[in-house]
Image: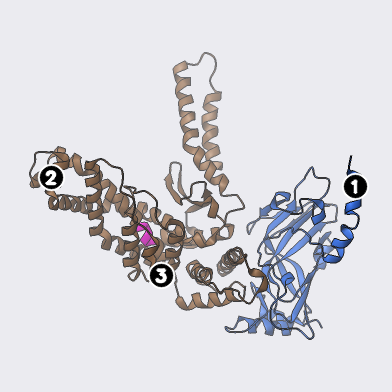
Chain colours: A blue, B brown
Amino acid sequence: MIIKSDRLSDMLAEGQRENTKDPLIIVPTPNLDALRSEGTASIDLRLGTWFAHLKQTQMAYLPLLPSTGSATVGPDLTSTTYIPFGSSYILHPQSFVLAVTLEWISLPNDLAAYVIGKSSWGRAGLIIATAAGVHPGYKGCLTLELTNVGEIPIQIRPGVRICQLFIHKLEAAKTGAISASSFSGSRRPMLRPLTLDAFAAKLSSAYDERNKMHEQP
Amino acid sequence: MLRIRSLSNEQLGRLDSFVPESDPNVVAQECRIALALLFWYLPFIGIIRRSTEIRNSFEAFGPFLRLAGDVLEPDTSPNERKIELVLSSEWDYSPFMYDRVQNLEDFLFIGLPASESGNPLLLPLAGHELGHAVWHREDLRKALQAEVQAAIIDSIGKNWAEYQEKFAIKITREQLSTDIFAVASWRLGVEWCLDQAEETFCDFIGLAIFGECYFHAFGYILAPGLGRRSVRYPETLARVQHLVDASTQLGSQAPNDFISLFEKDPIAALSPADGFLLKMADLALETIIPRLVTAAKTAVGRASISRSAGEVLVIRGRFDLLAPAENCSSIANILNAGWDAFNDPGLWSGYQNTAGRKAEVLKELILKNLEIYEIEQIQAQ
C-alpha cells in the first residue's frame, strides 16, 4: 500500500518529536504543510552535491564479480566530484553518473520505498534510478544512477528536485534487528562490488577444475 | 589562484619584454624577483590545490566560513564580510594557519592534517587556528609586550643568582631594564613568552568557540605530547593545565582525567643560558594567563556563538537514530554531539552491520549534518 502525502506529512512530523522510536526521517524535511495539502502519492527528493563517474580505463571490463580476480571496485575506478551549491554539473549525452539525494533518509522497519524519476527530467532525456528499491531500515542518502539518453547535454544542479520517493507500508513487518542489506550510512555515491550468493557461486565454480586442467601446458 | 596568476603574469610580461640588448644586470634582477615570487607563492598554490581534494570535509567549509566571519567580523552583516577562507589539508601531521599573506591579505589559509582532513571531529582544532587570526587582528602581541617584559624582568630578579651565573653580566638588578647588554640577554625570553602566549590564547579561542569537543580534538591529535619541548609552545602539561583551568570561565567542562592523557615534554636541548630564558618565559606566561582568558572570552563573546547542552542532547538523540539533526544553532553543538557519540562504546549496538564502520558512518553523519546546517543558514538569509 502506497502511503499518501498527507499521511507522510504526519509521519514526518511525528519523527521530529524527541523520543520517537524508529521514526520516518527525511532531512532536510520537506515542507510539511505543502505535503499535506498536495495529496500526492510521493515525496520529491532533491539532488545532492556528490557525483561519481567511472573513469576511462584500459581494463577489458568492470571487475564487479568476485570470480574476476580483483573483485573489489575501489575508488580508483571511479572519479568523485563535489559540486557546491550554486554550481552545476553537465551530463553529456550517453553519459552515466552516480549521484545522491540531498536528503538523508531513515526508513523505519515497517516501511519500504521506490525511487522514481521525475517526468519533467525524463522528457528532457534524463533517466534516473534504475535500481530503485529502498529496503526497510535504510539510513543514508540514496544513490541515484543518472543517464542522459538524449542528444544534448543536460545541466543539473544540487538542490533541484530530481526524483520522487513512493513509500510503502510493509505487511507483517518484523521488529528487532535491521537486515544487513538495508544499511548505507553514506552521504556520497559509491560503486560497490557484487557478492555471489551460494547458488551463483556454485554455478560459477562448476567447471573451475576442468578449466584449470585445460590451462595446464 | 586568479590573483596569483595575475601577479605572475605581470612578472612574466616584464621578462618577456627583454631583448638581447637588455642590460644583463636588469635581466638578472628581474629573474631574481621572478624566483622570489615563485618561492613565496608556491606553498600557497599547493595549499589551494590541496583544498580541492575530495578527501577534504567540503561540507564544513560554509559553516566554518560563517564562524570565521562571526569571530573576525562580528559587526559586519554576513553578506558584507570580506574574509576569504581556504580550508585545506597539509602533509604535515599538524594544523596550521597563514594570515595576512602579501597580496592575499583578505585570505585566511587554514590547514588540517592530510591524514585527518575528512574527519569533521577535528574541526575544533581549526578554532585554534582561527585564534591566530584574532591574535593578529587585535595586535595582542604588541598589547602584551610591556606586561611580558615586566614579568620576565621580575622573574629574573627572583632568580638573580642563576641569571648572573648563566650570563655573567656585571650589572645590578635595577639595571636589568636599562643596561643594553642586560636587555639583549633576556629579549629572546620575551619573544618566546609572547609566542607561547599566542598559542595559549588560540587554545582558549578554540575552547570558547567549541566547548568540550575542543578538549577531545586536542587530546586526539596531541596526546601524549609533541615528543619534544618547543620554546614557542608552552610545556605540554602546563598547556593542558591552562586549558583545564580556563574551562569554567570559558563555559565548558574538561573531560574527567583529561590531564592524564598527556606526558611531560622531554627537556629541551638548549644552552644553559637559553634554558634559563625558557624557564623565565614559562614563569612569565603564568602571570598573563588570566588576561589571555579574558581576551579570548571577549573576542568570542562578540561573535555570539551559541552553545547549548540541551541542543547537544537533541542532536545526539538524532545520531542515535542514524539521522542528522535540523535547526541546529551552531556547528559547536553538532561537533559536541559527534564527539559524545564517538566516545560511546554502545553507539548503534542495535544495528547489526555497523560493526567496524561506526567511525566512518559517524563522520558521514556529522558532515551531512554540517551540510544541513549550511542549507538552513542559506535559506534563512
Q: Is B281 on the left-hand or right-hand side of A46? A: left
Q: Residue at x 25, y 40 (%)?
A: B271
Q: Position of residue A203 (x, y in %)?
A: 89, 61
- Is the stretch drawn in magenta largely helix, strand or loop? helix
Q: Say whether disc 3 or disc 2 marks the residue closer to the N-terminus.
A: 2
Question: Which residue in the protein does label 2 denote?
Answer: B176
Label 3 Cα neighbours within 10 Å, binned few <14 / some 14-19 / many ≥20: few
Pointer 2 indicates a residue of which chain? B
Using the image as rendered, state which of residue B275 and residue B152 is in the foreground. Answer: B275
Q: Is B344 on the left-hand or right-hand side of B131? A: right
Using the image as rendered, state which of residue B246 and residue B237 is in the foreground. Answer: B237
Q: Residue at x 57, y 83 (%)?
A: A18
For residue B34, above or below residue B171: above
> Is residue A84 part of the magenta span, yes or no?
no
Pointer 3 indicates a residue of which chain? B
Q: Position of residue A88 (x, y in %)?
A: 69, 55
Quarter of the image where one finds residue B129: bottom left
Q: Residue at x 67, y 61 (%)?
A: A188
Element type at mark 3: loop
Tag nearer the camera, 3 or 2: 3
Q: Which residues are magenta?
A: B201-205
Q: Which mark is residue B255?
A: 3
Question: Which residue in the protein does label 1 denote?
Answer: A213
Q: Are marks 1 and 2 in contact (CB under 8 Å)?
A: no
Q: Is B85 on the left-hand or right-hand side of A9? A: left
Q: Is residue B139 visible?
A: no
Residue type at tag 1: Met
